[in-house]
Image (cartoon, grey):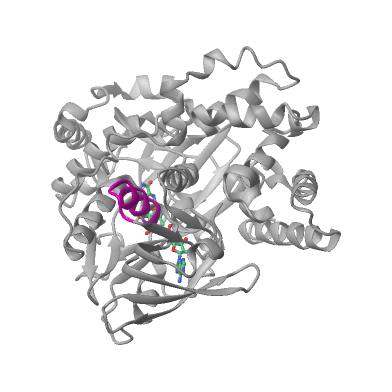
Amino acid sequence: MATLNQIADQEWEVLVIGGGIFGAAVARDAVMRGFKTALVERNDFAGETSGRSTKLVHGGIRYLEHLELGLVRECLAERTILLTMARHLVKPLPFLFPVFKGDRFPLPLIKLGTALYGTLAGRNTLKTQESFSALAVKDYYPFLANAPIQGAVKYYDAQMDDIRLCLETVLTAQMEGAQAANHTEVIKIGIRSDGKYDVVLKDTLSGARGKTRAQVLVNAAGPWADKLRSKLEPQHKPMLLLSKGIHLIVNKKFSGDAVVLSSSDKRIIFIIPWREGSIIGTTDTPFAGELEEVRASENDIEFLRNEVERITCGIRIENKDIITTFAGLRPLAALNSGNTAKASRKHHIYESPPRFFSIVGGKYTTHRLIAEQVCNKIEHALGRGHVRSRTAQTPLLGSFDLQSDPPRFYIPAQRSEMQLSSLKNLLCTYGGQIKKVLQIANRSSVLQRPLSPQHPLIGAQVIYAIEHEMARTLMDVCVRRLRLDQMPGCGLDTVGQAADLMAARLNWSWLQKEKEILEYQSWVRQQTEFLF
Ligand SMILES: Cc1cc2nc3c(=O)[nH]c(=O)nc-3n(C[C@H](O)[C@H](O)[C@H](O)COP(=O)(O)OP(=O)(O)OC[C@H]3O[C@@H](n4cnc5c(N)ncnc54)[C@H](O)[C@@H]3O)c2cc1C
C-alpha cells in the first residue's frame, strides 16, 4: 500500500491526478508501457463519479437518436473487451424496451433502432434481439400488466460493478509496478524552467505534506478537472459542462431483466436488477452548485417515483421501498450545447500547458480506450517510441486468477462456518482473489460469519480491505469496499462490528472508532434525508 511517503521526493515520468476510472486506467496502461507511474486520489478510489454510475457497460442505445454512430460502435467494441478483461465484474444483461401507446417512438422504430444497434455491434453482438407482443410482455413482466403496452423488444448489453472495476484497475496497476495512494490530494502545481512539474501533495487524513516531481501530469480529476487546471492556467476557458444524475436503490425486484423506459423529459430511465432489489435511474439536470454537495433532492426522487408510477400505471415506489439514493456529476465536455441531456458523451483529451493532459467527457464504458489514447499522447510528448497498449489483452487482477486458478478447486475444500450466500458473494466480488479472502477467513470463525443476518458480508472482507485494498477509513471499507450503505437498513446495525474489526486491526483508539462511526452514520443520513 502506497501513501504520500512513497510518492513524495521522487521524479515520476507520469503522475496521474484523480483515482476515478479514467485515472486508474491511465495509470494501468502507463505502467504497462514501462513508464515510472504514480496515481494520487484525494478521497478514495471510485469515491466520486465512478462509484455513482448506472453501472452499464453499454453502447448507449439512446445515442442512436442523436446519430452518434461512431460513439456507439466504439462503446460496443469496448464492451466486448471488458467482458473478458473483468469477467467477474462485467456481465451480459438482457434489456426489455417496452413501447406504450402515445410514446415518442413507435414500436417499428424501436425495432429498427435495436436492429441497428446489433449491426453496429457486428461481431461484438451478445445475442440477437427478440420481439414481444403486448400479451407476452404482460405475461412475462407482470409489473407492466396495467400499462397500455403495444409490444416490446429485448436486446442485450452488460452490467458492471463500477466501484470494484475501478478499484481492481488501481490494484492491477499497482501489481504492474505503479504506486497508488488514496487520501492524497494535489494542492499546488508549479512548472519548472526545464518543463517538469513540481507538485505539492497533502495527506487528507493526517494533514502531512510532501513534494514530488513529474515529467507528465494527467488531469483525471473528473468534475474537478477545471479547478485542477486552474492551478496552472487560472484564466483557461472552462472545459466542463456538469450534469447531475441520481438513482434510487429499491428493495423490490421488478424483473431479472433491465427495463428501458421512455421518460416524460424525452430521455431514458432504466430499472436495473441489483442484488436482491433494483436500481432506478437516472436524471439529467445541469449542475452549478458546490461539487462536494451532490445529493438526490426531494424533486429528483419525486421525479423518478412519478415516472415509474406513470409508466407502469399504478406502481408507486413508497419511501419504505427505497433503501437509499446516490447521486453523481457527469463531467461532460463543454462544447456548444448548454443542454446536458443532449450534450455528447464523447471524450476529449486536451494538452495545455505542455505535458499536462486533461481528460474531459467520456463514458465509463470507454475508459480503457481513453487511457490508451492518453498514453499514446504521453509517448509522443516524451519523445518515446510507440509501445502497443496491452490492456485489452490483459485481464484484471481477479479475472486473471479466475482464469489461471478456477475457484471450483478450492471453494469445496473450504471447511468453514461460511454460508453459501457469503461464498457466492465473495466469488462475484473478488473473482479469483477470493482465495486471499478465504485465507483471512481461516484465521478465526468470527471472520467467517455474516456481519448481520440481513446480508452475506463477512468480517474477513473488512480485514481484506485493509490488508490488500488500501482501505484506511471506515468509509473506505463500508461504502467503497463492502457497499454496506446499500444493504437493507443501510448497514446501520452492522457498522459497529465492522468498526470493531478495523479498530483492532489498525489499533484505533475508542475516540477514533466513534468518530469513524459518526462519519458513516452522517453519510447514510445525507443519502436518505428525504425518505423519512
Ligand atoms: C449519474 C451517472 C450515471 C452514469 N452512468 C454511466 C453508465 O451506466 N455507463 C457508463 O459508461 N458511464 C456512465 N456514467 C459516466 C461515468 O460514470 C463517468 O464518465 C466516469 O465515471 C468519470 O470518471 P472520472 O475518473 O473522470 O471521474 P471521477 O470518478 O469523479 O474521478 C475523479 C477523481 O479525481 C479526484 N480528484 C479531484 N481533484 C483532485 C486533486 N486535486 N488531487 C487528487 N485527486 C483529485 C476526485 O476525488 C475523484 O475521485 C455515468 C455518470 C453519471 C454521473
Where residue 127 sits, quadrant-wise, is: top left
- Is residue 52 visible in the rendered image? The answer is no
Give the residue at x 55% y 33%.
275
Rendered-image quarter of ligand 1: bottom left
- Is residue 95 visible in the rendered image? The answer is yes
Position of 348 relative to 93 (above/below): below
Q: Quadrant of the image for the C terminus?
A: bottom right
The foreground one among 160 and 389 is: 389
Position of 519 relative to 78 (above/below): below
The foreground one among 6 and 279 is: 6
Where residue 217 sits, quadrant-wise, is: bottom left
Give the residue at x 30% y 22%.
132
**Which x, y percent locates residue 492?**
75, 48
> What secondary structure predominates along the stretch shown in magenta?
helix
**Which x, y percent locates residue 73?**
17, 41
Q: Taking 499 as reference, is 198 left or right?
A: left
Magenta stretch in the rendered image:
23-35
The foreground one among 429 and 160 is: 429
Position of 379 relative to 88 (above/below): below
Give the residue at x 19% y 45%.
64
**Which x, y percent locates residue 184?**
53, 66
**Which x, y percent locates residue 168?**
46, 42
Give the residue at x 43% y 62%.
18
